[in-house]
Image (spheres, grey):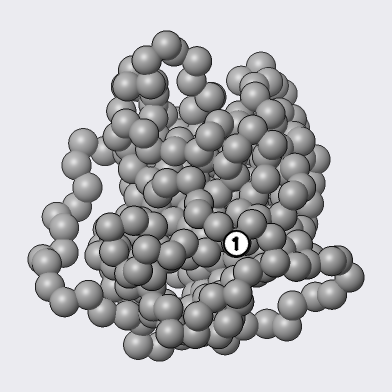
Amino acid sequence: MFHSRRRAVPLGALSATLALVGALAVTHHAHAGRTPPAGGVLDNIGDLPAPVPPGRIRVAEAPLTLRYTFDHGVGRPIADVTGRYRLWPVGQNGGLLRLVPQRGGLAVAYPDRCSLPRERDCPRAILEGVRDDSLNPGRRPLRYGASIMMTHADLADGANVLQKGYSVGGVSQFKLQVDHRQGHPSCVIAGQRARIYRAEPLIDVADGMWHDLECRRTPNRLIMIVDGLPRAWVPVPPMLSIANAEPLRVGGKGPGRGNDQFAGAIDDVFLSIGELPQVRTGATAGPVNDGPSPCC
């Protein structure tokens, strides 16, 4: 379900209002003449499917587009709209994901921000795929993003929305995050060298509203787009290549400790490798925070 900016309840109040929102969604769909999608808890899997055998890392050989709407409900696998690219819920310490009603469809609600004294005890949960080198853009034009809803209670030093790879160790990466206590979204890419490129507008998206976040890598720029308008960009070298053996992940860099766990809700995750649409004008965008990104 792709949407523009929308108002929603803060996630901290989500459990208290879920029944009411669900009832309203049922009523809406009843009037629409169809059965609403089934929300609820996504069961963590014990193990991911067998990993792809190691080998030379490749890049996408043709343009590719995928989108996850999460609208099929808990009774069906989490897959993109074509059904080809699956994600699995994985977690630790009792961390669970939920599909919750949102504008006639469903979104993924992540665990509340943990306040336990020891981070290692915190519930953690993300969506994770398997290795698929066709999702490596290499040097091709790249678009990726998601719609997110957060409040300031959901913020932390690290909150990763969508990523493939890591920014250290020569792995290479593309990533969307909402880091810091100020609620600033940012786009990050890194090649196999030590330099990390981050486009971060000085705006706050942790306001209990839905925001559409998009990252675009052109031949020489990385652009951060918020609610359809460009808000920041940084220059990037045309020869920078993103190719790694890591899976696509949504909501964190893994289920383990220090995973930059996202707290809030995520919807309409997308990735497109190939041609780029024209960037809209109407907002000031400039080089912002061309420096190191919080790891990783």
* Image location (x, y in percent) of residue 291: 55, 57
Query: 21 or 243: which is nearer to us?
Result: 243
Query: 124 or 80: which is nearer to us?
Result: 124
Give the answer, above or below, for where 251 lies relative to 143: above
- Taking the image as shown, residue 270 lies to the left or right of residue 240, namely right
Query: 20 or 211: which is nearer to us?
Result: 211
- The residue positioned farthest toward the top in the image shown: 117
Q: Callout 1: few (<14), some (14-19), or many (20+) C-alpha neighbours within 10 Å?
A: some
- Residue 15 lies in quadrant: top right
- Residue 286 lies in quadrant: bottom right
* Image location (x, y in percent) of residue 154: 61, 29
Residue at 64%, 49% (x, y): give it: 185
Give the answer, above or below, for where 278 lies relative to 216: below
- Residue 31 lies in quadrant: top right
- Taking the image as shown, residue 189 lies to the left or right of residue 172, namely right
- Is residue 247 shown to the viewer in this render? no
Q: How many marks?
A: 1
Residue at 29%, 63% (x, y): give it: 171
Give the answer, above or below, for where 163 lies relative to 184: below
Give the answer, above or below, for where 178 lies relative to 285: above
Query: 192 or 146: which is nearer to us?
Result: 192
Residue at 80%, 75% (x, y): give it: 280
Check disc 1 and report its element: helix, strand or loop: loop
* Image location (x, y in percent) of residue 133: 29, 73
**Quadrant housing the N terminus:** bottom right
> Residue tagged by mark 1?
290
Circle 1: residue type: Asp
Residue at 74%, 77% (x, y): give it: 279
- Is residue 183 shown to the viewer in this render? yes
* Image location (x, y in percent) of residue 206: 71, 37
